[in-house]
């Protein structure tokens, strides 16, 4: 019984260590610095522009065929109503016809894109 208990404690310690390492290894939200916004612009042009358009109006060539239409990032009222967490979730998991980017973009890159698209509604 003692060996079994010791083995169980050891397994829990290893699992706890793995979980701690995993949660601390996750990228953190990046700040909307000019450098991060600039990087977000480059990522946007490569991955988002075809649907959301060059200026974020939701009028990209691929977006014209989508239903519902892509977000118009210039709509100040709609963008103000969207929290960063909501937008980040949409970018990460996808929403409607928008694909998920959680495997294509790193977490910090998704935050950079989010900060860039926020500049359209200013």
Image: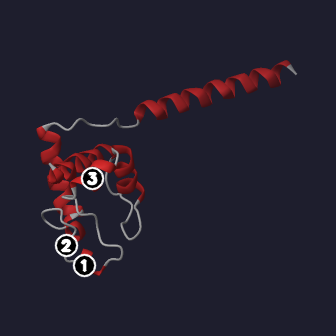
> Relative to 7, is 44 above or below?
below
Circles 1 and 2, Cβ within 8 Å, touching? The answer is yes
* Residue drawn at the location 35% of the way across and 45% of the way down: 83
Tell me if label 1 and label 3 are in contact, CB under 8 Å.
no
* Front-lying residue, 65 or 79: 79
Residue 72 appears in the rendering: yes
- The correct choice, above or below, for 76 with respect to 53 in the image is above
Disc number lying in front (2 or 3): 3
Outermost residue toward the top in this view: 2
For mark 2, give the secondary structure: loop
Q: Residue 54, how many percent across, how many down?
A: 13, 65
- Report, in whole angstroms, how far the alpha carbon at label 1 lies from the one at label 3: 20 Å
Q: Nearer the viewer, residue 34 or 75?
A: 75
Residue at mark 2: 60
Asked which secondary structure carries label 3, the reply is helix
- The CA span between labels 1 and 2 is 6 Å
| Residue corresponding to mark 1 | 64
Residue 16 lies in quadrant: top right
Q: Quadrant of residue 85?
A: top left
Instruction: Return the x and y of residue 23 as percentages of the image width and height.
Output: 47, 33
Relative placement, left or right, of 7 versus 62 is right
Q: Secondary structure at mark 1?
A: helix
**Number of numbered discs present?**
3
User: Where residue 33 sits: x, y (%)?
Assistant: 16, 36
| Side (left or right) of 34 relative to 25 | left
The percent coordinates of residue 45 (x first, y second) are: 16, 61
Residue plotted at (75% across, 26% down): 8
Q: Is residue 88 left or right of residue 30?
A: right
- In primary-sequence order, the first of circles 1 and 3 is 1
Earlier-in-chain disc, 2 versus 3:
2
Residue matched to label 3: 79
Q: In the image, is residue 90 above or below residue 21? A: below
């Amino acid at each position: 019984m003692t060996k079994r208990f010791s083995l169980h404690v050891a397994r829990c310690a290893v699992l706890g260590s793995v979980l701690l390492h995993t949660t601390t290894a996750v990228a953190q939200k990046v700040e909307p610095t000019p450098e991060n916004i600039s990087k977000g612009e480059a990522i946007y042009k490569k991955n988002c522009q075809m649907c959301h358009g060059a200026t974020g109006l939701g009028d990209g060539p691929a977006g014209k065929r989508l239903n519902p239409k892509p977000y118009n990032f210039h709509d100040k009222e709609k963008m103000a109503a969207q929290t960063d967490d909501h937008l980040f979730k949409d970018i990460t998991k996808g929403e409607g016809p928008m694909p998920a980017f959680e495997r294509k973009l790193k977490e910090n890159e998704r935050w950079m894109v989010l900060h860039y698209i926020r500049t359209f509604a200013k």
